[in-house]
Image (cartoon, rainbow, N blue to C red):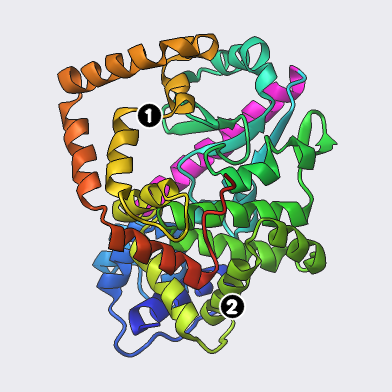
Amino acid sequence: MNDLQRGVINIIQSALTGECLSLPKSFNFYNAVKIAKKHKIECVFYYGALNCGFKQKEPLMQELFTLVCGNIAVSEQQIYAIKEIFSAFDKEKIDYLPIKGVLLKQLYPKPEMRSMSDLDILIRYEEYSEKIIPVMNSLGFTEGRVSDNELVWNKPMISIELHRRLIPSYNKDYYAYYGDGWRLARLSGGTRYSMTDEDQLIYLFTHFAKHYRDSGIGIRHMVDLWVFKKYYKNLDDKYIEAELQKLQLYNFYENIINTLKVWFEKSENNEVSDFITGIIFNSGVYGTNQAHVLSDALKLSKNKEQHKNIKKAKLISEIFPSYSFMKRRYPILDNNSWLLPALWLVRLADAVLFRRKNVGDKFSEIKLIDDKSVADYREALNYVGLDFNFKE
């Protein structure tokens, strides 16, 4: 861990604990602010910097304060929106289970310290058309994009992601454990459900692992884990270990927890903790495009010992996407799978005629792929205890 990383972490810890922690002598505040912006942790960084003795009148602190004010406004809007949605769902007898940032926000000293790009709620998909759509329309939301596991609704400053499942189905190993996720739900009042504290942590960590191996993950998600474990002190560690073993995540979990102890509890760093710290600081809030491309290529490599022709396989998968992908784009395929070849041609023509920039971007991504890069990416995941444990 270098001095810049240590300084950023100490500032974050100062915000969360109220302590004034010392910073390395060579600490560069300007570069630290750049990291805070890159990882979307301006609020927690600003409050920590105040606790560490930086003055509000300093130019960089004023710049951060402007961003903090905007984040506070967004945070208040999000809190109001989520209460409004929960109330409407209770009234209309719609089952729902809040997840991720919606729950984590209330564990931080100030809610704006935990920024959210969207609000995540698990719903029962069978209730979507008849019950949920009318409610969301009545609240002034507009229906947006649809993905494998998310149904997005928007209004100014607010984005809601209604999840039909906790984990995307294309993350086959984790999806095999979770299914849609409702088996873990416990009624907690009205039509609101929750998971046990242990299952919440397991899910947060599974989501963390999914992002880490798919494209990388940022500082905010590391802080989430530390905040959660500090708040819930009496977790059943044996249950957590047993479930993470089923997910083949326990080794990675141990490495992340050890890294958190290095960050926040003065444990000695080692090569693995330094490696993880470097990956996370370099990632940004949602990882890097190169990691995403290599991750996608790695998923195509079904045999752990073979990496040949991955670039060719990636190119073919872009031209002829899977049936499940095409079904999301063209719902008519749901009961007419025989139309798949024709719709491949329709999609290809649409791309050539109207989406040439997207085509160019895809080819640029494919150029990043070579057998050695993919093998190195797998090795880097294995080093910290991760892999794509897809069953044939």
Whole-percent x, y for residue 90 in the image: 75, 24
User: What numbered label is drawn on residue 321?
Assistant: 1
Q: Residues within 10 Å of mark 2 (few under 14, many from 20)?
A: some
Residue drawn where x is 63% and y is 39% of the image: 166
Q: Nearer the viewer, residue 117 or 327?
A: 327
Residue 185 sits in quarter: top right
Quarter holding the N terminus is bottom left
Would you say residue 78 sits in the magenta stretch? yes
Q: Is residue 22 visible?
A: yes
Residue drawn where x is 62% and y is 12% of the image: 129
Magenta stretch in the rendered image: 66-92
Q: Is residue 345 left or right of residue 10?
A: left
> Which amino acid, mark 1?
Pro
Q: Is residue 273 left or right of residue 238?
A: left
Q: Is residue 175 above or below residue 345?
A: below
Residue drawn where x is 69% and y is 46% of the image: 177
Would you say residue 233 sits in the magenta stretch? no
Residue 132 sits in quarter: top right
> Which amino acid, mark 2?
Asn
